[in-house]
Amino acid sequence: MRRPAFHLGSAFLAALFVLPILWSGWSSVRPGSGFSLDSYRRLATYGEGVGVYLTNTVLLVVLTVTGTVAVSTLAGYAFSRFAFPGRRILFGLILAILMVPYPTILIPLYVLLGKLGLQDSLVGLALVMIMFQLPFAVFMMRNSFAAVPRALDDAALIDGCGSFGVLMRVLLPAVAPGLVTVGLFAFLASWNDYVAPLILISSDERFPLPVAIVNMRLHDFGAVDYPTMQAGVMFMAAPCLALFLVLQRFYVRGFMSGALRG
């Protein structure tokens, strides 16, 4: 009786997540009485053009994912393999960032970026996104490295590898699921985030997709253009769904080998 109940419950939960996406897709192609792609045509020509907003989003994603993976990999390797004064305190301070709701410090960050000359910049926005991704990413990578036996390090050192060689040639392939998990979370955060770009970006030509799509709500005489908004939702959801399905196996392995280890 447990197996049918498990599958029935799983199917019900899956339907709860899938039905809104199907409804959005249906609404985007049937704005009136029949099938139409007019909402996607309006989406393509809205504002600066969907190509500009997509380019901004892709650039933001590339910078955020690359920076998050690079910094968290080096930090996780250091925390798991090297003993240095204040290691536990520093690790605790990094994790403490998780307790701070990031919208509460966006205004100070906006002022700081202005002093650094990175205000209204995708690079500055990417740095903010990286900062808020690092606590989880460092935690994940530290535990992923800790799950790899130190005997591999010793064998590589005996063969002549240095510390950086051990990381690049031996440990990175072993923690690949953790890298994929960190990269996937960074991708989802930078692809979908709305609040940070809304506050830190002021130029229309630098808006990422979430801000541009929300701005589509206002149509003639204050009416909401729901079909175009639903087209934008589908445009944003499709890459996330495809990437998650492709990387699902690595994503699950990353959590099993990293986050569930003490």
Image (cartoon, rainbow, N blue to C red):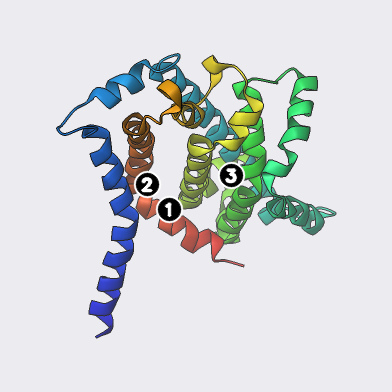
Name the secondary structure under disc 3. helix
Res 67 quadrant in image = top right
Crowd band around label 1 with a 10 angstrom C-alpha radius: few (<14), some (14–19), many (20+):
many
Three-letter amino acid code of the residue under disc 2: Phe
- Where, quadrant-wise, is the N terminus in this rendering? bottom left
Crowd band around label 3 with a 10 angstrom C-alpha radius: few (<14), some (14–19), many (20+):
some
- Camera-near label (3 vs 1) is 1
**Can you give x and y, in whole percent of width and height, for residue 191 in the image?**
48, 35
Residue at the spot 44% in from the left edge and 23% down from the top edge: 221
Name the secondary structure under disc 1. helix
Three-letter amino acid code of the residue under disc 3: Leu
CA gap between label 3 and label 2 equals 27 Å
Nearer the observer, 26 or 150: 26
**Can you give x and y, in whole percent of width and height, for residue 199 in the image?**
65, 30
Q: Quick one: label 3 or label 2, which is nearer the N terminus?
A: 3
Please indicate, yes or no, whether residue 163 appears anywhere in the rendered image.
Answer: no
**Can you give x and y, in whole percent of width and height, for residue 251 in the image?**
42, 53
Nearer the observer, 104 or 60: 104
* Disc 2 target residue: 244
Three-letter amino acid code of the residue under disc 1: Tyr
- Where, quadrant-wise, is the C terminus in this rendering? bottom right
Q: Is residue 211 left or right of residue 146?
A: left
**Can you give x and y, in whole percent of width and height, for residue 116 in the image?**
77, 21
